[in-house]
Amino acid sequence: MTCNLQTANQPQPVMVVLGDVPLPPEWLQISGQTLINGGVTNADGSVWGLTVVSAPSGATVDVTPTVTHALANNDYTFDVQVTNVTIQSLTVVSNSATQIDATNWAVVKPPTNDYVIVQATLNYTNDWIVTNAATAIQWTNGEAVPGNPLQRMVTKSNSVETTVTASLGSSSSSLNVWVIWADLTNKVSGTLDPHDNAQVLFNGNWPTPIYYNVSLHGGNNGVGGGNTLGPIDCLSNPNLNYCYTVGRMEAKAILQPSNIGSLLTTNWDMRRTWISIFWNNGTNSPFDITGGTIPPSPENDTANSAFKSLYPTYGDIFDLDFPGCPDTFGTNINHTAECYDNFYEYVTVNLGNGDQVCSSTNTYSYEAQIDGDAGRVDLNSLSTSLITIPTVPHYTQR
Amino acid sequence: MKKYISLSLLLIVTLRVYAQNLPYITNPPDFGKLSWEDAKSAVVNEESKNVCRPAYITNLFNQIQSGQLNHDNEALAIDLLGYLRPTNSYIIEFLIQNIDFERKRFSLPGGPSTELKYPCEGALMKTGQPVVIPILNHLTIETNELRRHLMCDVLAFVDKPVNSNILEGKKLAQQQISQKLAAESDATKQANLKAALKELEE
């Protein structure tokens, strides 16, 4: 008895039913392999035996059972059925990544290496068939899982997209694993990024008192105009009336893998905390200190959406900041004003289970000292380095 | 703060709730129980969530009207209401009526802020074009200088095309008020509208 196998290297369970005198499957072999009990008994007491054979496409395979325990007449009847074992689907083992859609799974790159485990499902659930057929699965990408040919693992150590494919004969199934990260840079000099379309910007420039798209605190809408980053003051820039001095900063996050922005479009956010203290005329109140007491403690300083550009049209997202002095806003100074701020910026992504941090936490700082009586700015500095936050003012009370 | 509402109008809002897709968030955080810092964070956080806008706006608006919020948190709740751009005419009317409700507590300028001194003014600005006709109607009867000034600010801001000079917005607002004035026969209302035009000239 022969059977023409239809597909390349296709493992096929061969099912044999024993005739007049039912034999145990273990007494039979096909292609030298002893059959196993398929667990299905027919009305006449015969039992289905199973084995898995593989052969190249178009090959003719003899699947005639041979009997290893001879009976008296040496006369047997067999009913042989041949079917394909195929890959039914691929999925990701729970908790190792989050499903985004039918074929895409994503996970944030963890601090220490871990793996996304991809699992193949066959069209048979019989353990013996699955075990024997799984060894014939051809995997593309990922790494072998020791002792489990039904699974493949993808490292989370690199923020790349990996397409994992499992093939078995003519059947195959693929899924994409995205390991997500955002490369964050806090820019304190240079110019605004042309991709940044935050609502607060006016034609890609900082707003001025009359050219603005967002009404800012107290109606002081001018942040100096132009597109440069770094510290500015109202003495040299008449388009600044938001504060006497500000430090114009742009945080830019390049999303990885490079095309993740086309898959996850509204899932991103940029957040920050800060530690800060202000003095006006050498004095302050709890409202001038983050946390309310000296030394100041961290507070949330995440900006609202008007200051962010979070739709990754070009694969990058942005958060703008312009910390300023004095904390009463505007350009009126009560003799003197000074501020000292440290900021901690980071990126989050929501894969459906809340925000997850997906970047390093990058710092920047701003400090300013203004002698309003003298019409002089003594210090106006924006940096990516943290500063030592003072606990006493630079200026004495006047 | 003035509290204006009637049962019949509330029913209209409520009916719309049931027409929405319920898997979205329908309840804002309870601003009556939040500290000021947490309320401030909530404004930012809630803004980015998928909310069922009509239901969420109704529930938030009910909090604002309840009289249970402290002054500072009430201002923050109005900020959040503005981000949601309420188009319901009753809510817009409420914001106009309370346009001179004044914020007492501000964030430090460590980060950029849209916290206006008058949060209802900010909410109307964010809401945009739906507020124009109600404000024009109010300007016919408004005699308070501050309130008139704030309404004119909103008109100019809303009328200003994106990436256009605010002077352009003032010009468009003047045109709208002039049209209203031309159609107005009542002398008192005409005087109020002329005062608004003068406000926009300054």
Image (tube, rainbow, N blue to C red):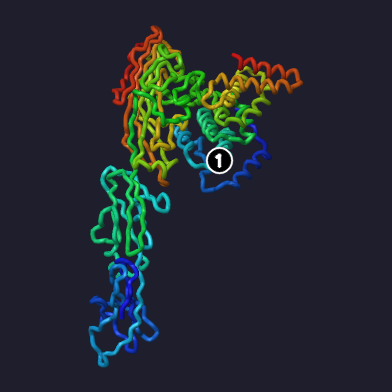
Q: Is residue A252 above or below residue A20?
A: above
* Residue extending farthest bottom: A72
The residue that mark 1 highlights is: B53
Q: Is residue A43 above or below residue B33?
A: below
Q: Secondary structure at mark 1?
A: helix
The amino acid type found where label 1 is placed reads Arg
Residue B179 sits in which quadrant? top right
Indicate left or right for A127 with B85 as reference.
Answer: left
Asked whether B92 or A310 is in front, the reply is A310
Q: For the C terminus of chain B, which image quadrant?
A: top right
Asked whether A277 or A154 is in front, the reply is A154
Residue A286 visible in the current orientation: no
Asked whether A23 or B61 is in front, the reply is A23
Indicate left or right for A93 with B28 as reference.
Answer: left
Q: Chain of mark 1?
A: B
Q: Is residue A280 above or below residue B103?
A: above
* Residue extending farthest top: A374
> Which percent across, then down, holds residue A41?
36, 81
Q: Residue at 54% of width from left, 35% of height from top?
A: B84
> Which percent across, then down, holds residue B7?
67, 39
> Which percent across, then down, holds residue B63?
56, 36
Q: Is residue A104 above or below residue A339?
A: below
